Image (cartoon, rainbow, N blue to C red):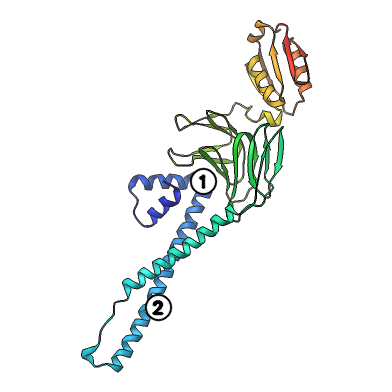
Amino acid sequence: MEIDQLIIRYLTKETNAVEEEFLHSWRQEAEENERYFQQYQRTWEWSLLQQQQTEVQFDRNSAWQKITDRTQLPSDTKKTVRWQPIVWQVAAAVTLLLGSIWLFQLVQEETNAPLQQLTASETQAIELGDKSLITLDKGATFQYPEEFAKHQRTVTLQKGQAFFEISHDPDRPFIVNLPNTQIQVVGTAFNIKIDSLGTEVAVREGKVIFKHKEQVTSPVTLTKGDIATYTIKEETFTTTQTVGNQWSWKSKQFNFTDTPLPVVLEQLEMAYDVHFEIGEQDLLNCRLSMFNQRAYALEEMIEFLELSLGIEIHQQDSSHFKVLGTCN
């Protein structure tokens, strides 16, 4: 059930205990959730007020008609017309129409915005209209509007990997549509990686709500240092702590603690778009510990590996390297 439908059921007192508990948990997950609920509730209360005012106006008209009738007709011919049920139906219909128009305008505002779509041929940075910065990894496909709507900021990452640095705007939540899932934030920095098995989200700072589009499972709230993975097959979320290299492809900063050399080289391949071939079986047992606080160029990383491990890395062509020797 969509959250809008659940809120309406709650306001019309049609929810059960399980639904009310779910709605309460959802409101507690993020400030933007509670703000969204409060806006919905205020709109609902305003609609009821309009209905009541309309009903009062009709009652006054009815009363005036009764006075007129009393002065013109004999007492035995007077009739009282019950307006209230009709008035309520009319007022409800008007409110529904106004609400439909508002929702239609909101949807139109979102859908009419011209969209840009690109597939990155290399690492590429994009500054959006709200000054948010999106860095796309090679092969990532990203869709975004030329100008964001007034009520929310919506983009789509269709495939690949991207790092998001979102400008803070509590009045316009930032939403990232993904295959099967969705991200909602106000202002934060996080990494998204999509593959054939599912989607991984790692948070560098701020708070992120990671949820299934169809609400088939409860959403998860992530904060700094958290990582969550959605698995398509099981339709489940699992959460852990970041190991430090989820956005190394962008930052060129690495954190290795007694890490096997094949894993290290795999991280470097993703970061620098190159390929390493291990030429000696013994090298599979090499392990590396390091933490660099600034971005390293590929040449610097190769030099560091050679000095730290006592190995030799030979360049075969522009993007192919062969690793030889034995570890210290």
Q: Residue 57 got which mark?
A: 2
Residue 276 visible in rendering: yes
Q: Amino acid at mark 1?
A: Ala
Residue name at image x 43 percent, y 70 percent: 50
**Along the polypeptide, which appears first: circle 2 or circle 1?**
1
Q: Residue 16 got which mark?
A: none
Name the residue nearer the viewer: 288 or 56: 56
What element does badge 1 sit on? Answer: loop
Q: Residues within 10 Å of mark 2 (few under 14, many from 20)?
A: few
Q: Amino acid at mark 2?
A: Gln
Q: How many marks?
A: 2
Residue name at image x 45 percent, y 45 percent: 26
Tell me the quarter of the picture where residue 85 sits. Answer: bottom left
Residue name at image x 20 percent, y 90 percent: 76
What element does badge 2 sit on? Answer: helix
Tell me the quarter of the picture where residue 184 sits. Answer: top right
Q: Residue furthest left?
A: 76
Q: Is residue 219 left or right of residue 56?
A: right
The answer to whether 67 is drawn above or below residue 99 in the figure is below
